[in-house]
Image (cartoon, rainbow, N blue to C red):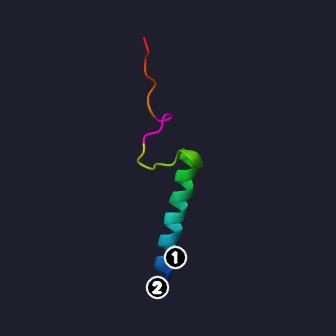
Amino acid sequence: MGLLLVLIAFIGIVFGLTVVKVKQLGANQSFDRVPTPSAAPAEDSR
């Protein structure tokens, strides 16, 4: 019974952290290790 509670608590923590991360980054700006134009710094074209 104790192991079940620990497992449920762990799953809840991981789910909660995932929800917070998605809310902070936005669903379209998730980190996928691929550079995107919106994430790149603006270049000066002078």
**Front-lying residue, 1 or 18:** 18
SS of the residue at dot 2? helix
Sort mark 2 into few (<14), some (14-19) or many (20+) by Cα contacts within 10 Å: few
Q: Give the range drawn in magenta.
A: 35-39
Residue plotted at (51% across, 58% down): 17
SS of the residue at dot 1? helix
**Front-lying residue, 6 or 11:** 11
Does residue 24 appear anywhere in the picture?
yes
Mark earlier in primary sequence (2, 1): 2
Residue plotted at (44% across, 84% down): 3
Residue 27 percent across, percent down from the top left: 58, 49
Residue 34 percent across, percent down from the top left: 42, 45
Sort mark 1 into few (<14), some (14-19) or many (20+) by Cα contacts within 10 Å: few
Cα–Cα span, label 2 and label 1: 10 Å
Residue 26 percent across, percent down from the top left: 58, 46
- The residue that disc 2 covers is 2
Check the image and report above or below for 19 versus 41. Answer: below
For the C terminus, the quadrant is top left
Give the foreground label among 2 and 1.
Answer: 1
Residue plotted at (46% across, 24% down): 42
What mark, if any, has residue 41 been given in the picture? Answer: none
- The residue that disc 1 covers is 8
Disc 1 marks a residue whose amino acid type is Ile
Residue plotted at (54% across, 64% down): 15
Residue 21 percent across, percent down from the top left: 52, 52
